[in-house]
Image (spheres, helix red, strand yellow):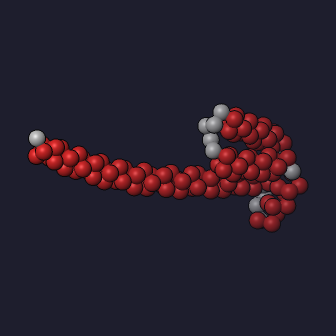
Amino acid sequence: MDRLLWWTSVLSVVLIVMVLTALRRAHIRVEYSVTWLIACVALFALSRSKTLLEWIASALGLGFAPTVLVLISGFIFVVMFFWTCVVISRLRDDNIALAQRVAILEFHLNRVKALSDSAAGQGQ
């Protein structure tokens, strides 16, 4: 159990460093980095507190405390992936709306250009 908790601590610190590096290089937006950092810190805190893990395991009726760590970390990251899917879906919808607006503007621009060309041709 100690080895699992140690590796979980190491992996959560690596994830924190990765998020901070991505934030510094502007590969991730601040609002998303905060949620990832909260998730990583929660994972680190759980992996460092054997007493808390055992208390949660007994409260949930689980016999093996590291199961709680896997369960909670899995839940945290599933929620994070769901939130990412929501953001991606919203961005896709925004891109579709933007493409439609550009197409409408292009249509109107071509129409104005055609009208001005025909007016210039009649004036000669």
- Nearer-the-camera pick, 13 or 31: 31
- Nearer-the-camera pick, 75 or 82: 82
Image coordinates of residue 40 in percent, x first then y, are: 74, 46
Residue located 80% across and 66% down the image: 59
Residue 98 seen in the current view: yes
Seen as rendered, the residue at the extreme right is 51
- Nearer-the-camera pick, 83 or 3: 83
Q: Is residue 82 left or right of residue 91?
A: right
Q: How many marks?
A: 0
Q: Is residue 107 left or right of residue 120?
A: right
- Nearer-the-camera pick, 60 or 33: 33
Q: Is residue 112 left or right of residue 25?
A: left
Q: Is residue 101 left or right of residue 122?
A: right
Residue located 85% across and 61% down the image: 55
Image coordinates of residue 23 in percent, x first then y, are: 68, 39
Picture quadrant of residue 8: top right
The C terminus, quarter of image: top left
Residue located 53% across and 56% down the image: 86
Image coordinates of residue 36 in percent, x first then y, are: 69, 47
Image coordinates of residue 113 in percent, x first then y, are: 23, 46
The N terminus, quarter of image: top right
Residue 96 seen in the current view: no
Residue located 20% across and 47% down the image: 116
